[in-house]
Image: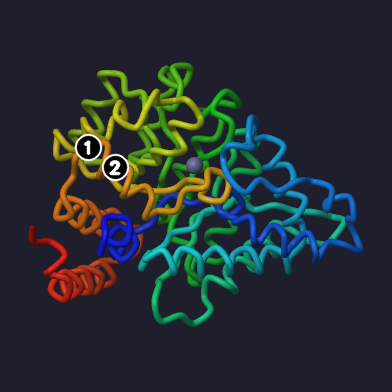
Amino acid sequence: MDFVQFCKKLPKIELHAHINGSISPQTMKELVKRKKATKPELADFSIPEGLEYITDFFPLFKFIYQLTDDEESVRLVTRRTIDEFAEDGVRYLELRSTPRANPETGMTKESYVASVLSVVNEPRQNIRVKLIISIDRRNTLEEAQEVVDLAIKFRDQGIVGIDLCGDVMVGSFDKLKPAFERAKAEHFKITLHFNEVKENIPEAPSMLSVNPDRLGHATLLDDASRETIYKNQCPIEVCMTSNVLCKTVSSYEAHHVKDLLKQGHPFVLCTDDKGVFFSELSNEYAKAGVAFDMTREQLFQASFQAIDAIFDDDRVKETLKQDWQTWRKLNQQEFSG
Ligand SMILES: [Zn+2]
C-alpha cells in the first residue's frame, strides 16, 4: 500500500464538515440537472473541477445555496456527502449545517433539519453519522434560540451538538451566548469556530467561559486562550487545507498542528469544506504526514485519539476503539519498515 492508499484505507473520524461545503462537483452537476426546469440559469455556472480555477470561493457558495434550497436536494446532498466520506475511509462522521428556510419551495428550518436527519438515520454498515446544528454569527439571539429549540426537538434523532459558525468578522459572541448556555444546560455538546483572525481574540475569554467541548480552527491562539485550552484539554478540530486556502495560516509546514503534536494536545484532522477546497480527509492525513514527517503509526494514533473527541457516548467510543484496534492488527504489515 503506498502512502496515499494507506491514508485512504486508514479508519478515520471526521468531526468538522459543513454539509454545503462538502458537496462534490459530481453532486453539483446532478443538482443542476434536477433544477433544469425551475432554475435553468444555474446551468450557466461553470462548476470548478479543481482549485486552480478558483480565485474567490464566495460565488461558489452562493451557487451551492441555490442548488440546495429544497428538501429533496438537501436529502440528496446529505446522502452523497455521507457516501463520499465512507468511501474515503471515514467510519464515524459528525456533519454540521445551519438550519435554512426557503418560502419559495416550502422548506422551513424545521423541515430542513428533518430532511438532513432522515438521511443521517438511513441504515448503513460502514459509517456512523451524527449531526451538529449551527448557529450563524449573523443570527439574532432569537434565531440562535430557535436552533437550540430544534436541537431539543430532534435530540433523539441524532443531534449531538451545537456549533458557532459564519463570517468571523460579523456579529458578536456575547449577543448569542445565552443560546449556548442554554444548549449546555440541555446537555448538548458545544463546538465553536474559534480565533481564526486577530479580531476574534477579544471575545475569546467569553467563548471559553461556556466550556466548549471542542474548538474549530483556533489558528491564532493568544497566550491566555492557549493556557485555558491546554489546561482543559479541549480538542481542536484542525482543517489544514481550509486554513491555508483561507490564508489564516501561511503554509502547511507553519500550521499549529506542530505545536499540538509537540504539546501532546488532542486534535482531530478534519476537512471543513471538502467539496469547495477539493481535499478529502485522507488527503488531510497525507498532508499532515508529509508536512510534519509523521510515521504511519503516528497517523494511526492521530486517528485513534480522535475517537475521544467525538460527541457520541462512551459506548460508541469503545466500539470504535475496538474497530480501530482490529484494523491495526489486520494491517500490521503496513506499519513495518
Ligand atoms: Zn468550519
Above or below 231: residue 71? below
Secondary structure category for the residue under label 1: loop
Secondary structure category for the residue under label 2: helix
Dot 1 corresponds to which residue?
292
Residue 24 screen position, x and y as percent: 59, 56
In the rendered structure, the answer to whether residue 169 lies left or right of residue 7 reads: right
In the rendered structure, the answer to whether residue 41 lies left or right of residue 18 reads: right
> What is the C-alpha distance between the residues marked 2 and 1?
6 Å
Q: In this view of the protein, which residue sits in the foreground, 318 or 13?
A: 13
**Residue at 53% in and 79% down:** 122
**Residue at 33% in and 40% down:** 211
Given the image, on which type of amino acid does mark 2 rest?
A: Ala
Residue 102 screen position, x and y as percent: 80, 54
Dot 2 corresponds to which residue?
288
Residue 314 screen position, x and y as percent: 25, 67
How does the figure colour the protein chain or chains? Answer: rainbow
Q: In this view of the protein, which residue sits in the foreground, 245 or 236?
A: 245
List the single residue furthest toward the left.
Answer: 337
Q: Can residue 241 be seen?
A: yes
Q: Quadrant of the C terminus?
A: bottom left
Q: Identify the disc placed on residue 125.
A: none
Whether pointer 2 and pointer 1 mark residues with C-beta atoms closer than 8 Å, the reply is: yes
